Image (spheres, rainbow, N blue to C red):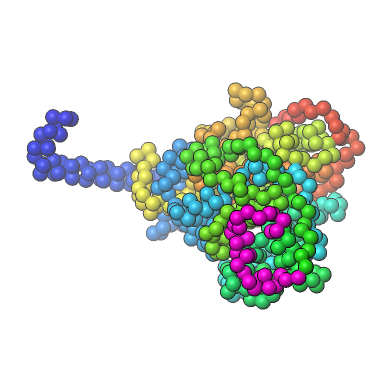
């Protein structure tokens, strides 16, 4: 082409004309290609009443890996192909935003990490990821629960003027009216119980936001289950949150009320002690943390005269040391494997100095490291964490239990494994690698029931998929449900086969690496992929395996057939339509050896669970 270019350079007018003609041709070709994208036209009524990912699967089988779904003037591009998903999530990730999702979640998460885009997302991801670093999780999990003075209660009430929180409150109330904590119920003995809602409670408890239904009803919260890696609502960190908020001066309403954006926190120790006692406790803790440069809340505390005035008088003793952070080994998360660039930055950003031996909580980390953070951003981050962190895990556990109820042989294999690996003791992080079959059951449950089943994006720029052009502004659904059940990717895609994660591969049964979007080349996206990948993936896997192993060791679960069929409903995750009602029996542990030598459980696959009615 060089002679041609040289000739054209001599004739700039002709050159420009040809360039324009080529561009025009390109545009027309792209428009043609876009036209060729299969289009499913629908009547919205056809999909009302069923979970949206189910008709999307039928349409995928009819129209293929990319199609446009139009309802009147509104249309969505539906993606069901691993390579296309990889392009959106990884290779061309900068061309996409969260689009509709940000709009939908704005009321509750604001600019929290899930809905945020652009510079805010970048800054918050850098700030939040280190707080979930395995260094923190590793040490906090498996250690005894921190001692929390039982006399302190936090009342967490919605601020009545904020419509956002009214919505959240009605959701809370719906939860309250439907269930009670599964752990509580199970501790009381055997019987029929509804576990879907209870798992939400249990996952919440693990995050540190435990609310039993009775307490929810009365609008109170008691930190009775301080199991959290985040410790986010344990006394120390919560109180720091309060301090941080108090720093905002104008939000300080009276000695017992602090308004944090649209949330009202009312501190009220049940023994009628007053708020200053709480604050003194914190001053003592702050003092115990040592001198050194004041960060975030500490600085706020020093400059909050009203607070200091309130806190006058004798100091209370600090709570006992919570957790010691000993490990300093560098750990690479799955996200890191998925997106080296972002994660290398994230690694560099890890702020060792913000780790607190006393309080390795996400909240502590955010406050300590976030000098510039506004109270609204802090609220948004915390709400995001609470919602993202509990609903997903609860859904995973719910659908795992549902699936296991149809596969008693898999439930039995988990029991064999748990008996052998743990016996009567509680699991620690060190056991995670040995609870392999249990982990594979979780992996397979997340394949069959991905939480969320659909990822949402909006194209900021035009992009093209095998010649199909997706114009800027298009709303996109990446159907994880379709990817996970794509017959081109999976043998017997609808069947529950935990052994698929080992046997058919080069490595031995169950010995493969943890399956994720990297090992499966975007055919499997339990935690998303690329730079927006879940930051709680490791934590959630630990949590699910720990919860499942402990439940299976102690109880047997059967579907309660007297109750309506389970059914699936679309939510942010896959919800049960009528709850998951199960008959729970205490397991007879007399034959189960607490110390049997570990041998991989024998597991025979026994057919497909099918899809819930
Ligand atoms: C993002 C799933 C637990 C916090 C995501 C995404 C998925 C996911 C699929 C990607 C969303 C997208 O690309 O649009 C899950 C599942 C979990 C779980 C299945 C449990 C089994 C957690 C936990 C936390 C968490 C425990 C932390 C407290 C987040 C955050 C994001 C996210 C903050 C947004 C990250 C970003 O956009 O940069 N999660 N998640 N998740 N998850 Fe999780």
Residue 505 location in percent, x, y? Answer: 60, 25
> Horizontally, is 467 left or right of 499 in the view?
left
Queried whether the magenta region covers residue 144, the answer comes back as no
Bounds of the magenta span?
286-313
Residue 267 location in percent, x, y? Answer: 72, 69
> Horizontally, is 326 left or right of 455 in the view?
right
Q: Nearer the viewer, residue 369 or 160?
A: 369
Q: Residue at x 56, y 56 (%)?
A: 370
* Whether residue 442 is visible: no
Residue 372 location in percent, x, y? Answer: 52, 59
* Quadrant of the rendered image containing residue 317: bottom right
Q: Quadrant of the N terminus?
A: top left
Q: Nearer the viewer, residue 267 or 221?
A: 267
Residue 394 location in percent, x, y? Answer: 68, 51
Q: Nearer the viewer, residue 216 or 82?
A: 216
Queried whether the magenta region covers residue 287, the answer comes back as yes
Q: Nearer the viewer, residue 35 or 450?
A: 450
Q: Is residue 353 above or below residue 336?
A: below
Q: Residue at x 39, y 51 (%)?
A: 460
Q: Residue at x 58, y 42 (%)?
A: 526
Q: Extreme bottom residue here?
A: 254
């Amino acid at each position: 082409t060089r002679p041609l270019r040289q000739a054209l350079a001599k004739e700039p007018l002709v050159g420009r004309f040809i360039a324009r003609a080529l561009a025009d041709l390109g545009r027309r070709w792209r428009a043609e290609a876009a036209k060729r994208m299969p289009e499913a036209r629908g009547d919205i009524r056809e999909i009302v009443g069923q979970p949206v990912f189910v008709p999307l699967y039928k349409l995928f089988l009819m129209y293929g890996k990319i199609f446009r779904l139009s309802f009147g003037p509104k249309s969505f591009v539906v993606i069901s192909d691993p390579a296309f998903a990889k392009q959106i999530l990884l290779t061309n990730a900068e061309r996409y935003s969260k689009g509709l999702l940000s709009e939908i979640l704005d009321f509750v998460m604001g600019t929290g990490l899930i809905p945020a885009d652009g510079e805010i997302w970048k800054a918050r991801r850098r700030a939040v990821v280190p707080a979930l670093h395995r260094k923190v999780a590793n040490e906090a999990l498996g250690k005894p629960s921190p001692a929390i003075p039982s006399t302190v209660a936090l009342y967490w009430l919605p601020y009545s003027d904020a419509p956002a929180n009214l919505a959240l409150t009605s959701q809370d109330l719906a939860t309250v009216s439907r269930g009670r904590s599964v752990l509580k119920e199970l501790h009381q003995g055997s019987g029929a119980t509804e576990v879907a809602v209870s798992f939400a409670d249990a996952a919440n408890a693990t995050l540190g936001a435990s609310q039993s239904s009775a307490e929810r009803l009365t609008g109170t919260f008691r930190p009775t289950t301080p199991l959290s890696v985040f410790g986010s609502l344990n006394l120390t960190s919560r109180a720091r949150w309060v301090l941080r908020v108090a720093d905002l001066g104008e939000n300080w309403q009276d000695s017992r009320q602090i308004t944090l954006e649209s949330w009202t926190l009312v501190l009220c120790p049940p023994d009628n002690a007053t708020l200053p006692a709480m604050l003194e406790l914190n001053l003592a803790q702050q003092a115990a943390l040592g001198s050194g440069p004041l960060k975030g809340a500490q600085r706020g505390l020093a400059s909050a005269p009203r607070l200091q005035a309130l806190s006058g008088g004798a100091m209370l003793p600090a709570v006992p040391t919570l957790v010691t952070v000993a490990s300093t080994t560098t750990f690479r998360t799955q996200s890191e494997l998925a997106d080296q660039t972002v994660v290398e930055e994230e690694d560099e950003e890890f702020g060792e100095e913000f780790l607190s031996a006393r309080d390795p909580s996400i909240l502590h980390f955010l406050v300590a490291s976030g000098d510039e953070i506004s109270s609204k951003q802090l609220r948004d981050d915390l709400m995001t964490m609470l919602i993202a962190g509990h609903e997903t895990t609860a859904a995973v556990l719910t659908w795992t239990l549902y699936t296991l109820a149809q596969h008693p042989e898999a439930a039995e294999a988990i029991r064999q494994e748990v008996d052998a690996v743990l016996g009567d003791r509680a699991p620690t992080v060190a056991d995670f690698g040995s609870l392999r079959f249990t982990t594979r059951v979780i992996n397979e449950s997340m394949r069959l029931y991905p939480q969320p089943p659909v990822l949402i994006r909006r194209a900021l720029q035009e992009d093209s998929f095998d010649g199909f052009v997706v114009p800027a502004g298009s709303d996109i659904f990446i159907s994880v449900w379709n990817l996970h059940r794509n017959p081109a990717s999976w043998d017997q895609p609808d069947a529950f086969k935990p052994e698929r994660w080992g046997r058919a591969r080069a490595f031995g049964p169950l010995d493969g690496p943890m399956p994720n979007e990297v090992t499966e080349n975007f055919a499997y996206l339990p935690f998303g992929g690329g730079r927006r990948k879940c930051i709680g993936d490791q934590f959630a896997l630990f949590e699910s395996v720990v919860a499942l192993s402990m439940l299976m060791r102690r109880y047997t679960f059967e579907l309660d057939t007297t109750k309506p069929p389970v059914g699936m409903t679309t939510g942010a995750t896959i919800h049960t339509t009528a709850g998951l009602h199960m008959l729970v029996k205490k397991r007879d542990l007399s034959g189960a050896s607490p110390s049997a030598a570990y041998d991989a459980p024998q597991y025979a696959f026994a057919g497909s669970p099918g899809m819930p009615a």
